[in-house]
Amino acid sequence: MSTKIDARGLSCPQPVLMTLDEIKAVSGGEIEVLVDTETAKENVSRAATSQGWEVADVAEEGDAVRITIRKG
Amino acid sequence: MREDLAIIQTLDFFTPIVDDPYTFGQVAAANSLSDVYAMGGVPITAMNIICFPINTMKIDILREILLGGLDKMREAGVLLVGGHSVEDDELKYGLSVTGTIHPDRVLLNRGARVGDALILTKPLGTGIINTALKGHLASEALVEKAIRCMTELNKKAADLMTQFPTVHACTDVTGFGLLGHAAEMIEGSDVGMVIRSASVPVFHEIKEFVEMGIMPGGLNRNRKFRMEMVDIGPNCLPWLVDVFFDPQTSGGLLIAMPSKEAEVLVNKMHDKGIQDAAVIGEVVTEPKGKIIVS
């Protein structure tokens, strides 16, 4: 089961902080992060990688981007 | 105005980057005055421009901001001669500054020549620190260091620089980041640049933020806009590339001048307490219009 984070409409560093909080809360699994800026997309991906998570998928959905990160 | 006297007029204002109103006033004023210093001029008078949400914010905050600004103007020897305030939902503050300069001695942000060394006078990373501060991630010590850097006037650096008539170009490093402003310096000209990443003064504490993706939106935009002009060598640490595109608030001067004199100027700066000043690279013949970061 994956957790979902909706970080649309939020400016940096909020999307990254929400992702890092979630990563800390769960030990592994799958997290989906919804963002709507190019910066948030890049920074969330980087945040995940820095914590040993893998960016499994980046899919555009209308004006937003769904980033799926995974561990374990 | 006269054959030997020209005036410079500038205007710059922005939204708060720190919580403390007095500090914000200082940073905004230092940032506004910097435009005149970067041209080699001497600021003489200034006017406040402030947008303030008077219905939702205490008037004390306004007072503190203006006091911070005034203290920096005093330090700069600048006379506050007026100003204008507007009611606005979002707080903004800055100055319109008038300065004087000899018309033949106006320094532009372009004109760097082959054989010039590049000097940077303040460490990079204030944009990243401000972003980390918003997320409550930056330590008090680091924030203090960044504030000291942002409130520091470029006056001393400019006073020393203007003693050298051989300075070819100067700009202050602000919103476009080091590489953005360096790119402007050589854009459309027939010279290139080498920047030695290990020589560039940076706040080293920000490495972990960069690696965690704690970066301002402007950084990505700067990188996208200028990356075509930049070649990153294998010896440049990846996190530094981001720092070199970090938008700076009240950043240091970037100076291009013949390398021998550059060494002398940097030593003088160190003597005067501008400890972070360093030669960070040089202007070269090839590759034209490109910046190599080694």
Image: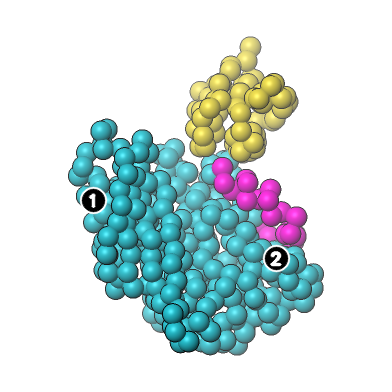
- Residue appearing at x 60%, y 54% in the figure: B245
Image quarter of residue B115: bottom right
Q: In the rendered structure, the residue with mark 1 lies on which chain?
A: B
The residue closer to the viewer here, B22 or B46, is B46
* Residue B88 seen by the camera: yes
Q: Amino acid at mark 1?
A: Glu
Chain A: colour as depicted: yellow
Q: In the rendered structure, the residue with mark 2 lies on which chain?
A: B
Quadrant holding the C terminus of chain A: top right
- Residue appearing at x 41%, y 53% in the figure: B13
**Disc 1 designates what residue?**
B64
Question: Residue B252 vs residue B259: left or right?
Answer: left
The residue closer to the viewer here, B130 or B59, is B59
Q: Which chain is cyan?
A: B
Which stretch is magenta? Answer: B217-239
- Residue appearing at x 37%, y 55% in the figure: B94
Question: Residue A40 vs residue B22: left or right?
Answer: right
**Disc 2 designates what residue?**
B187
The residue closer to the viewer here, B166 or B211, is B166
* Residue B24 seen by the camera: no
Q: Amino acid at mark 2?
A: Glu
